Amino acid sequence: MYTLGIDIGSTTSKCVILKDGQEIAGTSIVVAGTGTDGPEKALTEVLADAKVSRKDLSVIIATGYGRKIFSAADGEVSELSCHARGVHHIFPNVRTIIDIGGQDAKVIALNEQGRMSNFLMNDKCAAGTGRFLDVMAGILQLKIEDLETQAALAKEAVKISSTCTVFAESEVISQLANGVSTPDLVAGICQSVAVRVGSLAKRIGIREEVCMSGGVARNGGVRVAMEKELGVEIKYSPIAQLLGALGAALYAYDKACSK
Ligand code: ADP
């Protein structure tokens, strides 16, 4: 039996097809989110990746920012529940999830059963989200996937003192003009995200194990900075950006079994 989870984010659409509620048969990531043709493209790509057709899918569950307007789904589940479910499937001992997406950051506390027991969210300010990193990568003329390698080359992370993305943009430009090296700036930018989201995590209370999910988890510079900031090991899966979609595919499997 095949079930599909689609996570329609603010910037990116992600799909996972599960076989019999266990094995990942296909995935897709399309950098175009809600209100675009990203969700349909992600659906087409995941079907090709899993080598199945739409009629082979028992149930489709949508999650993410755009979940309510995706008519191809059989139901929707909140992204908090889906991230909790997806993370628990991969890392059953995780009790704190730090999920940083394109437009928001959430810290989710899990109980022993892997269910959400509490959460805190920042969706009011771009600093501490993927948007901040995307803007900074643009200024430095780097691809988002290159921030990790640049941060690893840093001798000393430069402290970014502006807490606002717009002011931080000017600060980075003036640091560049002062001859500060790109790696030191990138490490400082990653640290700035870790400090902001780390303070959200400290407010909720860190319980180990701790895992990062969402697209920003793919940035090793932020993961390393977060480990330093919180003083704990951060669990990481190469499918971090797909964990919400995986959770949705697991909920789809439950629904298919109860039919
Ligand atoms: P949303 O669900 O809000 O659309 P995602 O969880 O998909 O967001 O994360 C999108 C963010 O992930 C982007 O803003 C970008 O900063 C980051 N990202 C995406 N791909 C990579 C990558 N290969 N390396 C580092 N960061 C990445």
Image (tube, helix red, strand yellow):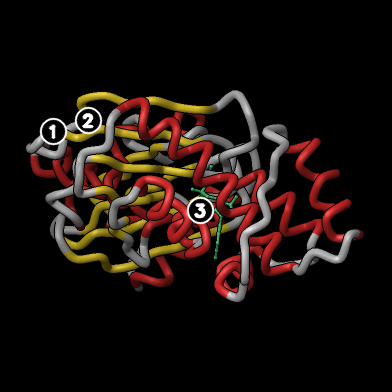
| Image: 3 above or below 104 | below
Q: Which residue is mark 1?
A: 111
Amino acid type assigned to the residue bearing label 1 in the image: Asn
- Of residues 135 and 7, the one drawn nearer to the viewer in this rendering: 135
Q: Earlier in the sequence, mark 3 or mark 2?
A: 2
Q: Give the residue drawn at x 67%, y 33%.
A: 163
Residue type (three-letter) at the residue carrying disc 2: Met
Q: Nearer the viewer, residue 90 or 107?
A: 107
Whether label 3 lies within 8 Å of ligand 1 gets the answer yes
Question: What x and y, as percent, mark residue 228?
Answer: 41, 54
Q: CA distance from mark 3 to mark 2?
A: 21 Å
**Element under label 2?**
strand
The number of callouts visible is 3
Determine the residue positioned at 47% across, 61% down.
Answer: 218
Q: Is residue 93 left or right of residue 238?
A: left
Mark 3 surroundings within 10 Å by alpha-carbon count, few (fewer than 14), some (14 through 19), many (20 or more) = many
Report which residue position mark 2 lands on: 116
Q: Neighbour class for label 1 at 10 Å: few (<14), some, many (≥20)?
A: some
In 3D space, how far apart are the residues under numbered discs 1 and 3 (Cα atoms)? 24 Å
**Residue 70 visible, this orientation:** no
Three-letter amino acid code of the residue under disc 3: Val
Question: Quadrant of the rendered structure where residue 128 is?
Answer: top right
Q: Position of residue 197 (x, y in %)?
A: 48, 38
User: Mark 2 and 1 residues: CB-CB less than 8 Å, in contact?
Assistant: yes
